[in-house]
Image (cartoon, rainbow, N blue to C red):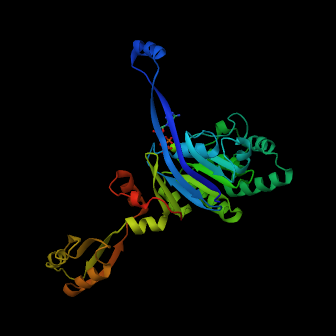
Amino acid sequence: MSLIEVRALTKTYRQAVRQPGLRGAFRHLVHQRYTERVAVDHIDMSIERGETVAYVGPNGAGKSTTIKMLTGILVPTSGEITVDGIVPHKRRMENARRIGVVFGQRTQLWWDIPVIETLSLLRDIHEMPAQEYRKNLDFLTELLGLDEFMHLTARRISLGQRMRADLAAAFLHSPAIVYLDEPTIGLDIAVKERIRGFIKQVNRELGTTVMLTTHDLGDIQDLCRRIVIIDHGRIIFDGALAEMTDAFARERVLHFQLRTPCPTAEQELQRIPNVTVSGLSDTELSVRFDRAFISARDITGAIMQIADVSDFRIDEPSIDHVIKRVYDGTLNLAVRKGGGA
Ligand SMILES: Nc1ncnc2c1ncn2[C@@H]1O[C@H](COP(=O)(O)OP(=O)(O)OP(=O)(O)O)[C@@H](O)[C@H]1O
Ligand SMILES: [Mg+2]
């Protein structure tokens, strides 16, 4: 059995529908009307111990709702979840001992007490032995640079410091699993890199399982081998990051630099099926092609016959580009549903 098992998991929110104005408010008191919104719609997922999984999708896709069900904060409408053999919302305390959570949008620190006091309160809540607390605190202090602000109250620290403190709070009790919901939101690049480095190191050294929700593609590229994409509450892709780019990002662009101008090159190349050629200047040509139909080698061979090529390079689409197209609906991943990393 996998560490996290999710079967047909569904969450429907009931939203009150109210007509505008006073009359609407009265009418609502008498005849309450509701609509149902399916935020998570029959998702299946298995996560193994030690994995780092990126859980991504456009705004409103259902990511936070899934995380809240996994942590036991929300009760599913239907479907099943087991995390390390237990059902999170039925055994919340037991589940809480094994997991760490960061909601980047909202701090879990006590606002009016120094960060270090929050950590020692958490030590008591988790009933941590003094020695383990000391060891973990030293480790976290070093990796996250807590020294510079641990004696300040959460109210007075910067966003980047707050996120580092939140991470320390989430990892303090050596949880087997951490759920990070947008842990780098709003942070500058230096802090982001520090946080990514931290997550990588913890995953590598302690084998912590990480489920990460983010809109920052750098986070995904840097941290996750597996990516799960959710849209309108449904999982539309689950697989290795490399597999996604291989399977769906077939478009490539070859850029050629010519030693001497070759006015006919553009027309000649345009005759090859499935390529689009654009001349940028007398001595520069770009050839866009789908590698399912033609190889870079064939194109390079063809141009070498007619022009004097001094240099060339190939551009591959970025993950950024692929995911954006999935969100736009211009790339249909529905066929790729299922299957782990
Ligand atoms: N408490 C709630 N009551 C009613 N509807 C909700 C509630 N929480 C979320 N929703 C709705 O459920 C859907 C999924 O929301 P969720 O917060 O899970 O999305 P998300 O993928 O985390 O988005 P984002 O990237 O913006 O954080 C949205 O349409 C949202 O409006
Ligand atoms: Mg969210």
- Residue 231 in picture, x, y percent from top left: 43, 49
Q: Is residue 335 left or right of residue 108?
A: left
Q: Quadrant of residue 262?
A: bottom left
- How far across and how far down the image is residue 58, in percent? 43, 48
Where residue 331 appears, as percent x and y from the top left, is 35, 58
In depth, the one of 46 and 109 nearer the eye is: 46
Asked if 8 appears above or below 218 in the picture, the reply is: above
Q: Residue at x 48, y 64 (%)?
A: 241
Q: Is residue 78 above or below residue 199?
A: above
Q: Is residue 173 above or below residue 256?
A: above
Residue 191 appears in view: no
Front residue of 293/185: it is 293
All told, the count of numbered labels is: 0
> In this view, which residue lies farthest toward the bottom?
305
- Quadrant location, the N terminus: bottom right
Q: Position of residue 87 (x, y in %)?
A: 66, 46
Query: In the rendered image, is residue 305 in sight?
Result: yes
Residue at the far right: name it: 130
Q: Quadrant of residue 120?
A: top right
Residue for point 22% across, 76% down: 283
User: Which of the two residues, 281 or 238, is positioned nearer the viewer here?
Assistant: 238
Taking 28 as reference, is 5 left or right?
Answer: right
Residue 113 location, quadrant = top right
- Residue at x 46%, y 33% (from the top left corner): 36
